[in-house]
Image (spheres, grey):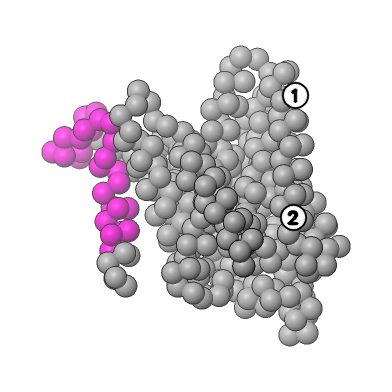
C-alpha cells in the first residue's frame, strides 16, 4: 500500500487530460490542424495543470493556517480569506478593471488576514476556536458587500460574478496556468523555508519565542505569502472550498506526522485531490461541466460536520 497509492495518483494525473465529455481520437492529438490537438493542448492539459497547482496551493494553505492559528478547522475558506479575495475580484469586474483582478483578489485576501491576525494576537490559547466564528462573521460581511456589487452591476457582470463564485478551472492555453503554478511553488518554498518555525508555532507562541523564533515577523511573512497565493488562485479559479480542510486532515490521519513533515505530501495530494474532483465534474454526463466549487462543497460540507462531531467526542 505504501507505493500503490502514489502510483495510482500519478496515473490519475497522467491520464486525466484524456477523459472528458468529448472522446479524443488519439491519432490526431499531434495534428496541429485537428480539433483533438486544440482540445487536448489548449483546454484539457492546461485545465489539469491548473487543477493540480490550485489544489496543491489550497491544501498547503490549509495546513499552514491550521499550524499558525493552532486550530484544526482553519482554512482560507472557513476563515473568510477566500471570500475576501472573491469580493476584491468581483469589485474589479464591476468597475471595469478586470485586468487587475489578481491584484484586487490579493488585497481582499490580505485585508482579511490582517483582521484575523490582529484578532488572534489578542486571543488566549484556549480561545482560538473563536476564529471560526470570526471567519463566519467576515464571510457574512463580504456576502453583503457582494450583494451590493450585484445590485449595481449589469446583467453581463452579474452573470460573470455568479459563474466566478461557483469556481471554475476553465483556461485556454498553458500561459493562463502560469500564475497559479508560480503562486503554488512560491508558497511551497516559503513553507519549506519556515518549516521549523511552523512546527514550533503549532505548539504555542510562547514556546516558539523561547526557542528564538521572532513570532510576529514569521507570522507576518508567512501569512503575507499565503495571501498572495490565495489572491492569485481565487482571481483565476474563483473560490474553491474545503480542499484545505479535507486533504491535511486525511494526510495527518494516514501519516501521523507533524505539519512540518507533511508539506510536500500535502502539496502533492492536494493537487491530486482537485484533479480527481475536476475529473468527476467533467464526466457526469451533464450538458455542461459541473462547477468545481460545487463538487468540493458536496464533499467538504459533510466532512466539516464530521470533524466538528469528532472534536466534541474528544
Q: Note whether 30 is above or below 97 in the view shown.
A: below
Query: Which residue is labeled 2 in the image?
Result: 131
Quarter residue 97 falls in: top right
Q: Is residue 62 magenta?
A: no
Tell me if residue 35 is in the magenta stretch: yes
- Which quarter of the image is occupied by the C terminus? bottom right
Q: Residue 13 at x, y = what percent?
A: 32, 53
Kindly give the residue lying farthest to the left in the view shown: 27
Q: Height in image: 250 above or below 113?
A: below
| Marks 2 and 1, the one that precedes in the sequence | 2
Residue indicated by mark 1: 148
Quarter placement of the N terminus: bottom left
Q: Secondary structure at mark 2?
A: helix
- Furthest residue to the front? 313
Circle 1 Cα neighbour tier, 10 Å, few/some/many (<14 / 14–19 / ≥20): few
- Whether label 2 touches label 1, CB < 8 Å: no
In the rendering, at what x and y percent does residue 19 appear?
Answer: 26, 40
Task: Pick the residue in front: 18 or 134.
Answer: 134
In the image, residue 74 above or below residue 282 = below
In this view of the protein, can residue 182 be seen by the observer?
no
Q: Of residues 148 and 229, which is closer to you in this image? A: 148
Where residue 186 sits, quadrant-wise, is bottom right
Q: Which residues are magenta?
A: 7-36
> In the rendering, at what x and y percent does residue 217 appear?
77, 69
Viewer-side label of 2, 1: 2
Residue 121 is situated, as x and y percent measured from the top left of the image, at: 83, 63
Amino acid at each position: 500500500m505504501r507505493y500503490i497509492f502514489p502510483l495510482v495518483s500519478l496515473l490519475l494525473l497522467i491520464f486525466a487530460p484524456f477523459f472528458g465529455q468529448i472522446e479524443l481520437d488519439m491519432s490526431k492529438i499531434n495534428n496541429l490542424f485537428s480539433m483533438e490537438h486544440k482540445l487536448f493542448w489548449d483546454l484539457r492539459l492546461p485545465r489539469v495543470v491548473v487543477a493540480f497547482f490550485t489544489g496543491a496551493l489550497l491544501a498547503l494553505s490549509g495546513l499552514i493556517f491550521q499550524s499558525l492559528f493552532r486550530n484544526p478547522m482553519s482554512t482560507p475558506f472557513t476563515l473568510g480569506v477566500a471570500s475576501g479575495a472573491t469580493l476584491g475580484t468581483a469589485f474589479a469586474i464591476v468597475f471595469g478593471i478586470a485586468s487587475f483582478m489578481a491584484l484586487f483578489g490579493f488585497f481582499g485576501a490580505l485585508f482579511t488576514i490582517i483582521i484575523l491576525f490582529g484578532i488572534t494576537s489578542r486571543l488566549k490559547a484556549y480561545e482560538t476556536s473563536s476564529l471560526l466564528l470570526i471567519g463566519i462573521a467576515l464571510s457574512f460581511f463580504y456576502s453583503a458587500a457582494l450583494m451590493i456589487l450585484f445590485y449595481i452591476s449589469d446583467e453581463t457582470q452579474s452573470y460573470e460574478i455568479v459563474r466566478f463564485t461557483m469556481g471554475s478551472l476553465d483556461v485556454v492555453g498553458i500561459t493562463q496556468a502560469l500564475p497559479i503554478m508560480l503562486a503554488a511553488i512560491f508558497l511551497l518554498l516559503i513553507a519549506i523555508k519556515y518549516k521549523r518555525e511552523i512546527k514550533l508555532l503549532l505548539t504555542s507562541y510562547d514556546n516558539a519565542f523561547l526557542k528564538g523564533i521572532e513570532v510576529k515577523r514569521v507570522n507576518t511573512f508567512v501569512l503575507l505569502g499565503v495571501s498572495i497565493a490565495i489572491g492569485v488562485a481565487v482571481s483565476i479559479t474563483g473560490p474553491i472550498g474545503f480542499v484545505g480542510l479535507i486533504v491535511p486532515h486525511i494526510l495527518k490521519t494516514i501519516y501521523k506526522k507533524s505539519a512540518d513533515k507533511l508539506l510536500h505530501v500535502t502539496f502533492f495530494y492536494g493537487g491530486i485531490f482537485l484533479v480527481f474532483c475536476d475529473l468527476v465534474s467533467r464526466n457526469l454526463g451533464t450538458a455542461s461541466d459541473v462547477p468545481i466549487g460545487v463538487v468540493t462543497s458536496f464533499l467538504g460540507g459533510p466532512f466539516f460536520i464530521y470533524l466538528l462531531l469528532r472534536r466534541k467526542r474528544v
